[in-house]
Amino acid sequence: MKKLLILLIAIALFSCKEEAKPTYVVFNGTVENSPSNSVKVFGNDFEAELSIADDGTFSDTLKINKNDYYTIRVGRESSPVFLVQGTNLGLTLNAKEFDETLSYTGDTASENNYLAAKYLLSEKEMAFDKVYSLPESEFISQTEKMNSSYVDLLNSTEGISDEFKAKETKELEYAHLNNRENYDEYYVYFTKEEDFSVSDTYYNSVSEFNFADTNAYENSNAYKRLAASHFGRLANELSEDKDIDIALAYLQVVDENFPKGTTKDDLMYNYLRYGMKPNKSLEDVYNLYKGANQNEENLAAVTERFNLLKNLTPGNTSPAFTYENHKGGETSLADLKGKVVYVDVWATWCGPCKREIPYLKEVESEYHGKNIAFVSISIDEKKDYDAWRSMVSDKELGGIQLMADNDWKSKFVTDYGIKGIPRFILIDGEGNIVNSDAPRPSSNDIRGILDGLL
């Protein structure tokens, strides 16, 4: 009996396990004037859609994978949010003044109210076109000032956990370096000074930084963006020096700087999702990725895109369209036979698309009366039909203004594999592809290409 009692006590002791820590976040709140019937939360291989009731409230339990930054979205507005397992978080906002009214309560209120304040601060101090158009010394001074403002905000916010503060300190460092990495390219984009280059000492500040830190890459989206920017810059330099395709240069740079593994694959795959182009280097790009690949799912996706793009190389017959014309009736590609066609795929909500409008008007004016048709195809959703009609009229948009029949899922859009806009396409008078990813009207290259076709 004594032995049995000892055995039972031993079993009880060894079977008592530490209670499992919760992996959920209780998230609730109120959204006024919501344009959508749900709040979307996503990030880190997690995605949830929280229904908004008629009175504007929502509530749900989110089983997240780890404590980290996620994104919340209501309609087209979004904001970062820091979620921690086993906590409660409350949110209130007015969707008509999204950024200004974001307010959090609950266990991680301090962290998330900091993120909301940080975003407002960035809107105040980071006017991209103005900051990136500054001369080098002024740009450095301004970005240093901005970074100090973020650090001061972080240090002065009370109630933030040590975990978050350590993580956010790194995020600010990575974001600051990312601004530095992008300066050369963005300065040229905003100022149109094609011959610009930074000073010989400009990149000295990042010369000792580890851009191949796989642990940081796996745990920080800001580091991922920084690494992509850094290798993108090196790829631009290699592409110009060796006169090779930019996608091929990017894969070569990454291949040289990372050992074979998931980080290399992720960098390559994320670039190829948008950067693989239907040109003479397409097969070389695909084969290089295929040889370095470590993820069968990613390889399958890249292979599918490769098979689509190889039919869009110059000389192939262009996918066709027949869409509603703003002036009435329908217009098809066949209607324009005999003319060079410069297609702009855009939408009224797309900021970069709207920035191209003045340049497009300028090019249209220069080539007025010549054998070329300028066609703008909107991929706005049906609910934004009136917005499309109004913008075309209010901004006096020229050319042939069409609206696709099924936004992103319209056949012309999917046949061209379009994943981002604005997208410009050149088609010759016989309906064959000249360039399925043509230079934008803001580019200095477009006029030379058009002159060669007319």
Image: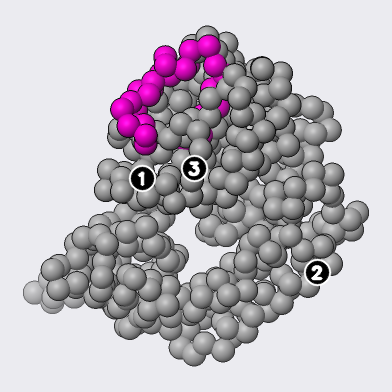
Depth check, front residue: 368 or 53:
368
The residue under the point 66% across, 17% down is 453
- Looking at the rendered structure, which numbered label has been put on residue 138? 2
Depth check, front residue: 300 or 40:
40
The residue under the point 58% across, 83% down is 153
Residue bearing mark 1: 389
Indicate whether 207 appears above or below 362.
below
**Amino acid type of the residue tagged 3 in the rendering:** Leu
Magenta stretch? 318-345
Depth check, front residue: 370 or 9:
370
Q: For residue 110, which quarter of the picture?
A: bottom left
Among the two numbered marks 3 and 2 on one chain, the one whose residue lies closer to the N terminus = 2
Q: Position of residue 99 (x, y in %)?
A: 43, 73
Depth check, front residue: 373 or 327:
327
Q: Are marks 1 and 2 in contact (CB under 8 Å)?
A: no
* Image-based side of 5 in relation to 109, left or right: left
Q: Are marks 3 and 2 in contact (CB under 8 Å)?
A: no
Q: For residue 321, which quarter of the picture?
A: top left
Residue bearing mark 3: 397
**Amino acid type of the residue tagged 2 in the rendering:** Glu
Q: Position of residue 231 (x, y in %)?
A: 69, 45
Which quadrant is home to the N terminus? bottom left
